[in-house]
Every structure is written in C-alpha cells, then in structure tokens.
Amino acid sequence: MVDRQRVCEQRCPSRKSLESWVSLALAQSQDGPEEGEVTVRYVSAEESRALNARFRDRHRPTNVLSFPASDPGDLGNSGFDSGGDPSGVPGSSPAYLGDLVICPTVVEAEADEQGKSRRAHHTHMVVHGILHLLGYDHLSLVEAEQMESIEIHVLALLGLPDPYA
C-alpha cells in the first residue's frame, strides 16, 4: 500500500504506478517482506534541500531520500517470513516500511541530462528508495553491485532500460 503525498507543483506518478513499482521491488528483493506500506512524498527543491541538509549534511536538493521505519537490519528477524505479516498474526496489516521523499525537479533535471525518459527515472528512484528502506546500500562495491542488479532487473521487468548503462 502506498500513501502518495504531493506538496509540489510538478506532476508526479499516480498512486497506481507507485504501487506497482513498490510491489515489484519488494517481490524482487532477496530478504525483504513480500508486502508493506510506504509513504512517497513528492516535494519542492526547497524542502528536499532542507531535509538533505538536516539528515545528510548536504546543502542541496537531491533526487530521493529514504527514511526506514525501523532498523533495516531487523527486517529479516521481524516476522516478514510469514507472508509479509510482521507480527505473524493472520489478518494484521502489512509492515510500515518507511518514507521516500522525492524531488521531481531534481529527478526530471537528471533524466534530461542523462537522456532518459522522466518516467523511467522516476521509476528508478522509487525502486532505489524502496531498496534503501529494505536495508540495501551502495557504500561498497559489493553492496552497490547487489543493489544495482536488483534495480536493473526490476526495471527490465517493467520494460525499462538499464539505468546504469
């Protein structure tokens, strides 16, 4: 389930598109839940810059920020193995994975600079952000290769090109 929030003037992907991208990213991740809830908030460059400065000490807007709801290292031990149900109790709600904050101004500028479609780059940023919520990272070469291979695979399943090519 996706809570889509739009607090900027730019057009943003629909909730239906976001839900399909999130579901596919969850399905293709190796150790994460099969389902979960996430908030995707589309913000202005000013809000992106403020959040990036506050949480990453980088004083510029950025494409996507990921805020996990819990320690991503706990995901494997929190009951997700039981069909996406974090409590293990049938009928309970899916786990809240966290928040993605996306700045469409930055995403669209990057897409234009890199010669990619804006939709493909928005999709990539959502998939990338979801993987961060699940604990994937790209701080080392091994981590980056693992994360990027999942991103490439998910985007290929959606008929989109390799974002790293």
Image: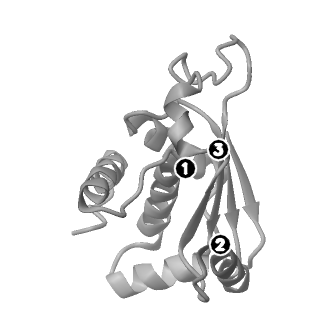
Residue drawn 59% across the image and 26% down it: 78
Residue drawn 40% across the image and 72% down it: 117
Q: Is residue 58 left or right of residue 94?
A: left
Residue drawn 51% across the image and 79% down it: 108
Mark 1 burial class by Cα count in 10 Å: few <14, some 14-19, many 20+:
many
**Residue 70, label in figure:** 3
- Identify which amino acid the numbered label 1 is placed on: Leu
Indicate the position of residue 150 as horizontal and vertical percent values.
Answer: 32, 48
Comparing labels 1 and 3, the label whose residue is closer to the camera: 3
Give the Cα separation between the discs numbered 1 and 2.
15 Å
Q: Which residue is mark 2?
A: 55
The N terminus - image quarter: top right
Give the Cα separation between the discs numbered 1 and 3.
9 Å
- Identify which amino acid the numbered label 3 is placed on: Ser
Residue occupying the far top of the picture: 90
Q: Which residue is mark 1?
A: 133
The C terminus - image quarter: bottom left
